[in-house]
Image (spheres, helix red, strand yellow):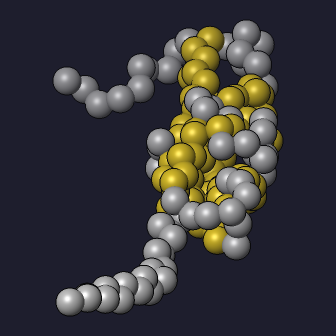
Amino acid sequence: MTAAINASMSSVAVAAVPLSAFADKAGVSAYYECYGTASTCIASANITTDAVTVTSSGGTGAGPTYAWTQVSGDVFTITSSTSASTTFSISCARNTSNAAVYRCTVTRGAGSFTVDVNVTAEYSYASDGSPPGGEEP
């Protein structure tokens, strides 16, 4: 008696995990405060935010690569426009604030994913005779 075993293996396609990304901060802010006279407080301050880092996972192919671009608002200087981690800086005049939305596009192979980050900077100035800011207790 003989037996034959016919085994065939069909190919199985494994779907690639889709590319995803997120920023460690949805928004980043920086502040500069000066309390004094107009002659002792500078007219404008160079303000730099903490670093924002985008983490990506999934996808296939070369990369990932990162590209930071301005979506809207004021123009900030980006310290590293092609890195996963960057800071934003701007010269801010007394008693003004600047705000913008910046987008990081993460690309890996043919896939891409975007993450938006709100960026703000503010220079707060009060003369010596001004009452302290904030609400009364």
Q: In which quarter of the image is residue 104?
A: bottom right
Q: Where is residue 85 in the image (x, y as percent from the top left)?
A: 65, 38
Q: Where is residue 31 in the image (x, y as percent from the top left)?
A: 57, 29
Determine whether 81 is above or below 18 in the image: above
> Could you tell me which residue is drawn at 53 percent across and 46 percent down?
55
Determine whether 41 is above or below 8 in the image: above
Image mark count:
0
> Could you tell me which residue is drawn at 69 percent across and 29 percent down?
47
Residue 49 visible? The answer is yes
Q: Position of residue 84 (x, y in %)?
A: 66, 43
Left or right of 55? Residue 47 is right
Left or right of 60? Residue 93 is right
Quadrant containing the N terminus in the rendered view:
bottom left
Residue 68 visible? The answer is no
Closest to the observer, 137 or 90: 90
Left or right of 1? Residue 116 is right
Closest to the observer, 57 or 125: 57
Closest to the observer, 85 or 91: 85
Left or right of 122? Residue 27 is left
Quadrant containing the C terminus in the rendered view:
top left
Determine whether 9 is above or below 42 in the image: below
Determine whether 124 is above or below 18 in the image: above
Q: In which quarter of the image is residue 38?
A: top right
> Could you tell me which residue is drawn at 58 percent across and 15 percent down?
35
Q: Where is residue 100 in the image (x, y as percent from the top left)?
A: 64, 55
Question: Farthest residue toward the front?
Answer: 1
Closest to the observer, 127 or 48: 48
